Amino acid sequence: MVYGAIEAGGTKFVCAVGDEEGNIFNKITIPTEDPQKTLSAIYSFFDEYPLTAIGIGSFGPIELNKKKANFGEILNTPKLQWKNFNIYDVFVKRYNLPTFLSTDVNVAALGEFRWGAAKDVDSCLYMTVGTGVGAGFVNEGTILNAWNHPEMGHIHVPRNFNDIFEGSCPYHKDCLEGLASGSALEARYNLKGSEIQEHQREIWELEGQYLAKAIMNYSLVLGPEKVILGGGVMKQTMLYPIIRKELSRLLNDYITIDKMEDYIVAPSLNDEQGIKGALALASER
Amino acid sequence: MVYGAIEAGGTKFVCAVGDEEGNIFNKITIPTEDPQKTLSAIYSFFDEYPLTAIGIGSFGPIELNKKKANFGEILNTPKLQWKNFNIYDVFVKRYNLPTFLSTDVNVAALGEFRWGAAKDVDSCLYMTVGTGVGAGFVNEGTILNAWNHPEMGHIHVPRNFNDIFEGSCPYHKDCLEGLASGSALEARYNLKGSEIQEHQREIWELEGQYLAKAIMNYSLVLGPEKVILGGGVMKQTMLYPIIRKELSRLLNDYITIDKMEDYIVAPSLNDEQGIKGALALASER
């Protein structure tokens, strides 16, 4: 069987065809322009294949509540051409196939759960720290999605004592995303994330502490077996040991985590967790 | 069919027999003494009935991971006689019936979901604010329980600017429970919770603000359709409007909540949400 997978991002769309084992036969990347232009390139790609179903992981926020008439609609995005665009309906109409939609981070969690770092455990949280911060949770193969899809990047965590940065989130100022996203790093230090050097230890210490505080909260609310940290900021791999150490300190043995090195891990799908997650979403039923 | 329900608390056990519609036929309350004495009173009660299954909502932390050999064991409780006591095994051995175990707050969430304030929605968070703080989450009838059961009372939220109380949690000092539980209120003001007067407005404002911060985090992580607030501290009903107002301010329309009065509500099962939840747990399979 051949499945279609779409990872819809704010700067690019990745489209792939593959099978239910996670094998990708073909893949293209399309810049995110206006919907009509972008879709036309996507259709050209998929039209060549006898698809069985389609899975989509989309940037958001999106309406994922099936009780709402606008299920599938992209909501308050700063990408104005995509605001109120229904990314589900267009593919249902074009291909008339079973079509499954979730958020980009939810499907990345599913991808790592099915074929990646969490393939041998029963639940995982996938967190991405890039321009923004987001996370998705999978328990026993099911993506957590209730009335609203999670918006975990916007939780509040305590500020460090001497941190006076006001925060960069347009909605909440100093929520996690406002304090610790790639955008926040740039605003905080007036440097591109890629310009922050590895030896600027105090910058990464603060970043790791905020991420650890968030992971503590997620861990206490969700109880995942594994936490996978991806996204551009996490390419700075020195963050992993900082986060593990701080999380141990914060939890203070309140919940048992056998080995912190196995609890906080990097993705293992080589930046294909999103597109493979969309493939998993398409093929799992 | 007749089902057995047990609400196991640190100061008392409530035991009931009832049916799959939530009707309770008989109910007793037994003080929590040593396990042997307490169990003997429970057995005397249940032995009279032709039970079909048993549901238990227990104080915790408890081991709820079925992959662990000690599934059913009460873990780090300050009630030393119950520490490492397996509250699941004893009932399986005694009655040899299908037996279902979860935490006290998880079953309270299930009770309100099946027969209470959340009976017309698809998901709910039940939060109790009493001596401690805890919460459980039910989505489409299923209790959230992954590798560890939730320990939501111990998340960290930002302190209010001028709050210098160090926090009363023995594990984390100023986690939510350490700042806003009934015990924290007593330690903070050197007053029994019941002695704090309704007109001591600044006390309740601070309390409501902390609870709103926690509910914001839970809402962003879990996306429930409704949040039900119970427990002794919430008998101070002026907290509800304080919490609703502060939560609206914090969320700043980032997620859509149609009516805050319908989102943040009181339990509707008259302090029977725990025992009825245990009944729901016993009877839903």
Image (spheres, coloured by chain):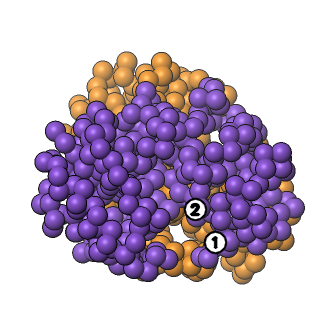
Chain colours: A purple, B orange
Q: In the shown orientation, is residue A40 left or right of residue A57?
A: left
Of labels 2 and 1, earlier in sequence is 2
Q: Nearer the viewer, residue A188 or A49?
A: A49
Q: Assign the N terminus of chain B to one quadrant of the image.
A: top left
Instruction: Mark 2 vs mark 1: give the one in front.
Output: 2
User: Which x, y percent locates residue A146?
Assistant: 37, 59
* Residue assigned mark 1: A169
Q: In the shown orientation, is residue A110 left or right of residue B196?
A: left
Q: Secondary structure at mark 2?
A: loop
The subunit letter for the residue under badge 2 reads A
Q: Nearer the viewer, residue A116 or B46?
A: A116
Figure quadrant of residue A103: bottom left
Q: How many marks?
A: 2
User: Which x, y percent locates residue B144?
Assistant: 42, 46
Residue at image location 40% in from the left, 72% down from the top: A33
Identified by mark 1, the residue type is Cys
Sort mark 2 into few (<14), some (14-19) or many (20+) by Cα contacts within 10 Å: many
Q: Is residue B231 above or below residue A283?
A: below
Identified by mark 2, the residue type is Gly
* Residue assigned mark 2: A132
Residue A52 in sight from this viewpoint: yes
Residue B152 in sight from this viewpoint: no
The subunit letter for the residue under badge 1 reads A
Q: Assign the C terminus of chain B to one quadrant of the image.
A: top left
Q: Is residue A39 above or below residue B125?
A: below
Sort mark 1 into few (<14), some (14-19) or many (20+) by Cα contacts within 10 Å: some
Q: Secondary structure at mark 1?
A: loop
Q: Which mark is residue B93?
A: none
Residue at image location 29% in from the left, 44% down from the top: A26
Residue at image location 39% in from the left, 28% down from the top: B44
User: Which x, y percent locates residue B247?
Assistant: 57, 74
**In 3D space, how far apart are the residues under numbered discs 2 and 1 (Cα atoms)?**
9 Å
